[in-house]
Image (cartoon, grey):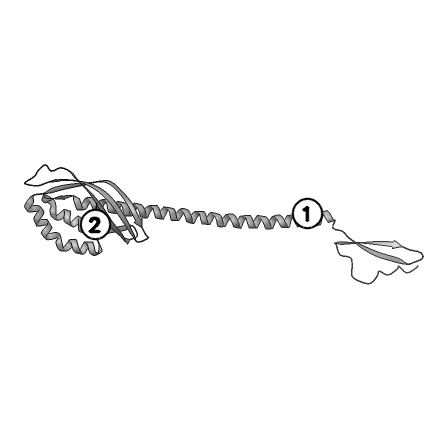
Amino acid sequence: MADEPAEPEGEAATPEEAVTTTVLDGDETVEETTDAEPAAAKQLRSHVQLALIVGTVVVVALAALTGWLGYRAYESRQTAQLRELYVGVGRQGAINLTTIDAAEAEKDVQRILDSATDAFYDDFAKRSQPFIEVVKQAQSKSVGEVTEAGLESMSDSEGQVLAAVTVTTSNRGAPNQPKRSWRMRLSVKKTGDDEAKVSKVEFVP
């Protein structure tokens, strides 16, 4: 029985390659290798990889945009809340300063002090007792009403509030006085996360 021909020495064909044998004259053979992966498959794989890269970039960009929009929305809410705080404290401060009743002078003055800070607090505290005595002697009563209030300027720690106030006043000698209109500029300073107080008061034309 004839010996079977030995297999050619060398590396075995990989799954990605196919071996073809061409028979020439006599016993001479030539092995040829061809790429088993068609060009269309390569192109498809390239497109898939590109699509994955583009998709990843889009997801990252959308995440960044969402984060930025969320931060801007948060900033807008914080600014609106701070504006409301300044205007609200300024409005109430103007009412406190123009609403004094001889029958409750101590309480009215204390309310002003409770809403004050810094130089305004120090100055008003020094004058509070003489002021109470004058109010009681004159048996005066004044009621203030803020007709308009707005923010003139603001920062993270302080705001300037303009307030238009109409004041009705009466006392022992003049029970029916005409209403008076005043304009006030109140400096409002933050004293806590959700708290602010009046630090300065000016009467403006």
In the shown orientation, is residue 171 left or right of residue 34?
A: left
Vertical position of residue 169 compared to residue 191: above or below: above
Q: Residue at x 11, y 46 (%)?
A: 105
Q: What element carries label 1?
A: helix
- Residue at the outermost bottom position: 9
Residue sitting at x 10%, y 49%: 132
Question: Is 187 positioned to the left or the right of 174 in the image?
Answer: right
Q: Nearer the viewer, residue 50 or 155?
A: 155
- Label 2 amino acid? Glu
In the picture, the disc for residue 202 is: 2
- Quarter holding the C terminus is top left
Seen in the picture, residue 13 relative to 80 is either above or below; the reply is below
Q: How many numbered tags mark residues here?
A: 2
- Where does the image place residue 28, in percent across and percent down from the top left? 90, 58
Kind of residue indicated by mark 1: Leu
User: Crowdedness of circle 1 by 10 Å Cα count: few (<14), some, many (20+)?
Assistant: few
**Foreground residue, 178 or 188?**
178
Instruction: Locate residue 61, reporting x and y percent.
Output: 52, 49
Pick whichever of labels 2 and 1 is earlier in the sequence: 1
Q: In which quarter of the image is the N terminus?
A: bottom right
Image coords of residue 13 (percent x, y): 78, 57
Residue picked out by circle 1: 44
Q: Which residue lies furthest to the front in this view?
A: 205
Label 2 or label 1, whichever lies nearer to me, is 2
Q: Hey, which residue is sitting farthest right in the picture? A: 26
Mark 2, secondary structure of its residue: strand
Mark seen at residue 145: none
| Residue located 18% across and 49% down the image | 112
